[in-house]
Amino acid sequence: MDAVRDRARALGTKVHARLTKPSSWILPREESSIAPPGVWSNKDYDPVEAERRTWTSTTIATYWFSDLVSIVGWSQAAAMYRVGLSATDATLACMVAGICIGVPTGRATFPVSPSSSTTLRRLVLSGSIGASLHIPFPVAIRASYGMYLYYFCVVSRGILALFWFGIHSVYADLPNHLPPSAAITTKGMVSYVVYQALQFPFLFVPPHKLKYLFRAKVVLLPPVVMGMAIWIAVKADGGNEFFYQPPRLQGSERAWQWLSGMTSVTGGCSTLCLNISDWARFSKRPKTQWWQVFLIPAFLTAMGVCGIVGASASQKLWGEALWNPLNIVDRWTDTPGGRAAAFFCSVMWMLAQISINLSTNSIAYATDLGSLVPKFLNIRRASIVGFLIGGWALCPWIILKSAETFLNFMSAYAVFMAPMTGILLCDYYLVHRRRYDVPALYNPKGIYHYKASAIVMTKRRVLETNSLQYGINWRALLVTIVTVAPLLPGIAQATNNTPISLGAQHLYTFNWLYCFFVSLVSYFVLSKVWPAKETMIPETVPGIVDESVGVEEGVQEEKLNKVLNKSVNETVEARV
């Protein structure tokens, strides 16, 4: 009992300090922090030490299963089928979208340097930044956008994740027994409170330990997905006719609708291309990312097929194409056995929703929010803050009920993620050739502070005059503006049906592909014509030296120290 009383007394003292002393919220400075004196960081944003690098290829596979095998994954292809595409069209759209996502997050092989000891070097695209350097997205993006402009990137991604965290927690189709001003029903509020109560404890789990939740989903959800698809196909006496029904759209209308559907799937998963660095940093070795190239298209296609079977079979059974699996479950509640099956399937889908909400939204906004004020917020604290804001303060049930314009705008806002992905990958692979100075990413006055340049154009030549350092990579800023500007009419139409030209509509139809490739090429050209010479270093400078393997296999500590000293000397010379 004495121990219990001591714990209670200590807890009371801690709570009192939290409520009366703002300084009590300051996190202790981690001894492993590589940030220079006066610059605050914490363990959640420092390079991941070897003890926490526990993710293997299997863990990465379960992560992608958690993200892609979901209600949204089921619904995407079914929604395309519902608007007039054939089953084959919708399946192919999911497969192509998976490839578009898998390449930025997957593995490729090409020459990196003529002076390399090997002809080809293996690399992982977006995931490689986290797996090789063991840093999260908010730190990695500083290299391409600058120490101050990176705030725009993390705030943009954080707001998007915070918004969808609340929206994904709401089920809106319930009968209303409360006054209309409440914008939610009694059943809806009870369901929401129960869901959030079940989800809340997972916010206290460190990100690298969420792999156990992902593994549980891999075991429990596939029988539900396959069982539902098989049941409804048998119930409808269906066979191959599900996939041989002709499309209701023809000609150019069909082509543009297919492209729109493919872009919708790609855009919906676009944040994953940025999020993966937050998770890949826990990888034991960079090669664990290899399977992403195949897993992402496979999971998206498989879920698309199940969704198409569900939509086409429900059309035959009930005269309505049900694109949401929960709507199919609703049809089972007439018998005791059906209600039992509905309960079991609903619990599994709820587990799937909690899992995807944590992996794609909660950890993303917590990582972004904490990186803005690391002195006070780590990932756990930021997750709780986001839970209160996104889950309750934003009142997501009201947004779903009456804020259709705002909902459409937030969906269209995702186009900003594509140029960030293109610029990040171009900067890491093509401009800097995988050579980042990791300690400098934590130094506000380091080489990634970027020099602001005054560019004077004349008839014969271009003059560039370096001025003070402002922490903004003007190349990334210019490319982001130029890339997104042509899509603003499309965003306006998607938000409130503003009339725009046919050409602007077609451009917005493939907005993700347009933004990604245009930003990548434009940034590469600008960086070659006006390179940021102060950021060019001969070798990677790691944040944590692993004496056994180094940054890559075969790199020894002596070589790393040599590179570090050389990089520091060059940085000093550049400042002088």
Image (tube, rainbow, N blue to C red):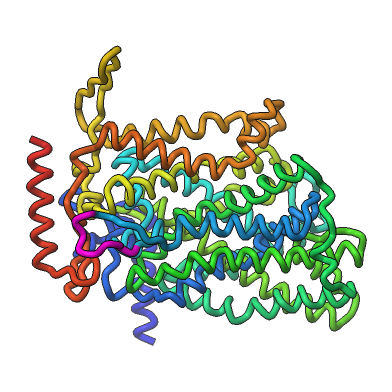
Q: How many marks?
A: 0
- Residue at 14% x, 70% y is 556
Q: Is residue 338 magenta?
A: no
In the image shown, does 242 or 546 lie closer to the viewer?
Answer: 242
Residue 422 horizontal side relative to residue 225, left or right: left
- Residue at 12% x, 68% y is 557
Q: Does residue 131 appear anywhere in the picture?
A: yes
Specify start and end residues of the magenta stretch as a single range.
114-122
- Residue at 62% x, 39% y is 409
In the image shown, does 315 or 16 lie closer to the viewer?
Answer: 315
Q: Is residue 528 above or below residue 351?
A: above
* Principal secondary structure, stretch drawn in magenta: loop
Residue found farthest to the bottom: 1
Q: Quarter-wise, where is residue 200 in the image?
A: bottom right
Residue 86 horizontal side relative to residue 560, left or right: right
Q: Is residue 407 above or below residue 55?
A: above
Q: x%, y% of residue 191?
A: 70, 64
Q: Is residue 121 magenta?
A: yes
Q: x%, y% of residue 465?
A: 20, 23
Q: Is residue 474 above or below residue 32?
A: above
Q: Does residue 392 appear anywhere in the picture?
A: no
Q: Is residue 488 above or below residue 90?
A: above
In the image shown, does 289 or 37 lie closer to the viewer?
Answer: 289
Q: x%, y% of residue 297?
A: 57, 63
- Residue at 71% x, 66% y is 305
Quadrant of the image containing the C terminus:
top left
Q: Quarter-wise, where is residue 475 in the image?
A: top left
Q: x%, y% of residue 533?
A: 20, 38
In the image shown, does 211 or 488 lie closer to the viewer?
Answer: 488
